[in-house]
Image (cartoon, grey):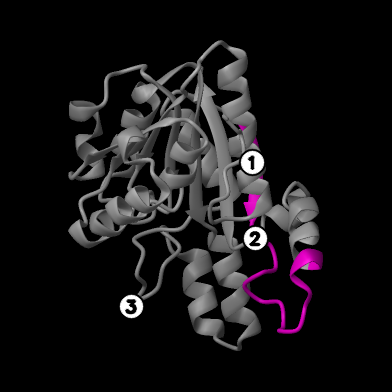
Amino acid sequence: MKTDTVAARGSGAVRRALEAELRAARARGVEQPVVVDVGGGSGGWAVPFASAGCLVTVVEPNPNALATLRRRAEEEGVSGRITVIADDSDALGAHVEAGSADLVLAHGLLEVVDDPRAVLDALAAAVSPGGAVSVLVANRTAAVLHRALAGRISEAQQLMEGPDGIVAGDTVLRRYDSAGLTDSLVAAGLEVTLLQGDRVISDVVPGGVREDELAEFELSASAVPALRDVAGRLHAIARRG
């Protein structure tokens, strides 16, 4: 029996948005929504989407991550609904037909690719009319705030003033704020229809907090602009203009 529940990693707000896109695809008459997960890693999103009845293509160059993905897919009995493309994200257009995807995921990807604009152009080309692109990125403002509160003022200053929101030794190439993410999506010909926070306080809340209370707060806070803008990650849903 098909379900629109996607029990994957990420906050309840991210899952809720993606489940809404899955329902919207089915409302358009798509029996098996096509999901493309670019930089999909070990299948944290791909396997749940396949379990929900989607046809999923994962574009991922890391062989260790792909081995884990294949194992998880076999354990869940969804290997037949997942296509693996062992390649970099900039090769997306060579493997995925333009306009073929109901939902394209780029979670934790734009921070680490060499050319984010080229990747965004490829994501926009892959999505179908009526479909959506889901982007999840590290938030520069949150990084500034966390460094400052930890007393690392010099680093906070660099993160705030530097063009890419990074400091020496960072594992990412860039961070985004709300305006920067929106501008990047619009420049790729996409219209942002949802911008919300992910992990608003989860990265800083002290131990002992009840998980259900934290989850409820995160779900509510994700849509409050002032709280969204200091969340650990920013999540956008965008569509072709």
User: Residues in magenta?
Assistant: 193-213
List the residue tagged with mark 2: 231
> What amino acid type is highlighted by mark number 2?
Ala
Return the disc, 1 or 3, that comes first in the chain's sequence.
3
Is residue 197 shown above or below 191?
Answer: below
Percent from the top left, x then y, of residue 88? 20, 45
Return the disc, 2 or 3, that comes first in the chain's sequence.
3
Residue at x-position 51% and y-position 37%:
183
Image mark for residue 234: none
Percent from the top left, x then y, of residue 86? 18, 45
SS at circle 2:
loop
> What amino acid type is highlighted by mark number 1?
Leu
> What amino acid type is highlighted by mark number 3?
Gly
Residue at x-position 42% and y-position 49%:
76
Q: Is residue 214 left or right of residue 56?
A: right
Disc nearest the viewer among 1 and 3: 1
Q: Cα distance, mark 2 to mark 3?
A: 22 Å
Return the disc, 2 or 1, that comes first in the chain's sequence.
1
Percent from the top left, x then y, of residue 98? 30, 18
Q: How many labels, in total?
A: 3
Q: Cα distance, mark 2 to mark 1?
A: 12 Å
* Quadrant in which the N terminus is drawn: top right
Is residue 65 shown above or below 179?
Answer: below
One can see residue 40 in this view: no
List the residue tagged with mark 1: 195
Is residue 105 shown above or below 168?
Answer: above
